Image (cartoon, rainbow, N blue to C red):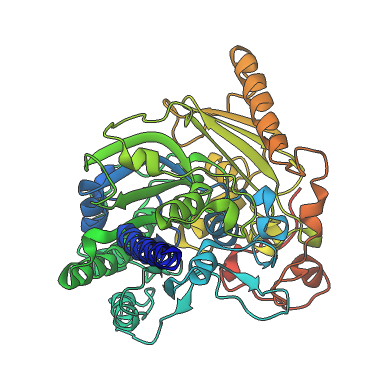
Amino acid sequence: MQNSNSSLTLTKKALLFCFLMIYACTTAIADEAKRPNILFAIADDWGVHGGAYGTTWVKTPTLDRVAREGLLFKNAFTPTAKCAPSRACILTGRYPWQLEDAANHQCYFPAKFKSWPEVLMEQGWFVGITGKGWGPGEANDASGKPRQIAGVPFNKRQTKPIASGIGNNDYAANFADFLDQTPDGKPWCFWYGALEPHRSYEYQSGVKIGGKMLSDIEQVPDYWPDTEVVRHDMLDYALEVESMDKHLGRMLDELERRGELDNTLVIFTSDHGMPFPRVKGYAYYDSNHVPLAIRWPKGIANAGRTIDDFVSFTDVAATVLDVAGIKANESGMAELAGQSWRPILESDQAGQVIAKRDHVLIGKERTDVGRPKDVGYPIRGLVRNDYLYLKNYEPSRWPAGNPETGYLDTDGSPTKSLILEVGRKNRNDHFWQWNFGMRPSEELYDLKSDPYCTSNLAAAQEQKSRLSEMNDSMTQELKSHSDPRALGNGDVFDSYPVAASAARNFYERMLKGEKVKAGWVSETDFEKEPLK
């Protein structure tokens, strides 16, 4: 009798074990189904210009669709307005001043900082990339092996571009190849890294190929002269933005055909502002302010909302890990500085959703070479309550790079060449001063009345209390991040080596008479003599 009861007990335990196993597997399958696929689309050097943002001279039907069927963010910012450090923040969820070498452009990416695409791959996701991921610079693991820091490359398919400045990568076709190779039942993540609208452009392609008119532009930014040259340059930029937007549109269509669109989280953004003087490589409002639209029908409540919350690229990693069901503290990544956007996605509110998201921190270290010993132009800044505060730690340095080395922190362009030509005739010209002249130690701008940041209020008596308060608030937060610059150890950023040998010691090599090249600027950008 005892043996019979014992057998019955064992049978019950076995049945219970089987039930628990079935339940666990069913739950795991259900959780797997809840996880969305992820399409992260990032342009190269695209400012906040598109139909959804009210820009009429740049046609962006895909941006407009993502915003209409999801969320449009009005106050999204990158901490640094240059490719490599901005993308490092996206990939790691940390501010540049928390990333050691990776705070700089053309750096060696520290092996200790893991990226979220690497985490997803470790967790069994199928992760791919087409176009540009992180860079320029070198990203190797501890053994010296190159890292797939943004995913496995898919770049075989090419197409004939409509203009010579546009690349031949058929991004959308490469995405289709990626989908074809995705294992059944596996969640996937794809990084679409457009090279557009990075320089260079085919001059007047916006008019000749895009059918645009110079009069289409409602306003040229106050910091540039309003001339035909500048307007052509802006329209050429617009054509490249539109090309990038069309590829994402084709990707969404592909997902729709496969029945995967509504279970895909689409994040559409850019690494920083447009590649023009006083924007890319600087720290003004147009430099760090970026477009951001998110679509995810299964995870967004009340689609079509416009969000006023201030969000940062440091939030991207936290958001991706959150929707992927991966705990940040179990990911192997360094501690994240950002917070997930999921509460904003799941809210039904528009405007300001989370009260504490009322500001962002920005700044920069070395965003390019061209100064003695390859030092940078360190800045920290705070955007809050319609004001931008900037602290320039080394105001004796040239902000765009030394004149005799071509102002290497500003990409070559017709706009740049025009402003430099005018400046050579008159160093007091305000356009030259705004774009290339020396800066004071502090800057303060009223973004409501002066969105182009041309009227510095730092010396105004009525702004003294605001200036002091913003500086104190910014410094306190930077110290909480253990920012070496705020702690008085900022020289460490200047000690990190330049990865590209062709660019290393550019200033010193020029002084020695070596004919060094900088392919991103024009030969006429170099001043014949150093300026005082």
In which quarter of the view is residue 2 placed? bottom left
Residue occupying the point 39% across, 44% down: 342
Q: Is residue 90 above or below residue 338?
A: below
Residue 267: x and y in percent read: 36, 56
Q: Is residue 301 above or below residue 192?
A: above
Q: Nearer the viewer, residue 108 or 241?
A: 108
Which quadrant does the N terminus fall into? bottom left
Residue occupying the point 36% across, 38% down: 344
Residue 12: x and y in percent read: 37, 62
Residue occupying the point 39% across, 77% down: 167
Judged left or right of residue 99, residue 429 is left
Residue 432 in sight in this render? yes
Q: Nearer the viewer, residue 276 or 463?
A: 463
The number of discs equals: 0
Q: Is residue 260 above or below residue 317?
A: below
In which quarter of the view is residue 228 placed? bottom left
Residue 188: x and y in percent read: 37, 70
Residue occupying the point 79% across, 72% down: 509
Residue 98: x and y in percent read: 68, 49
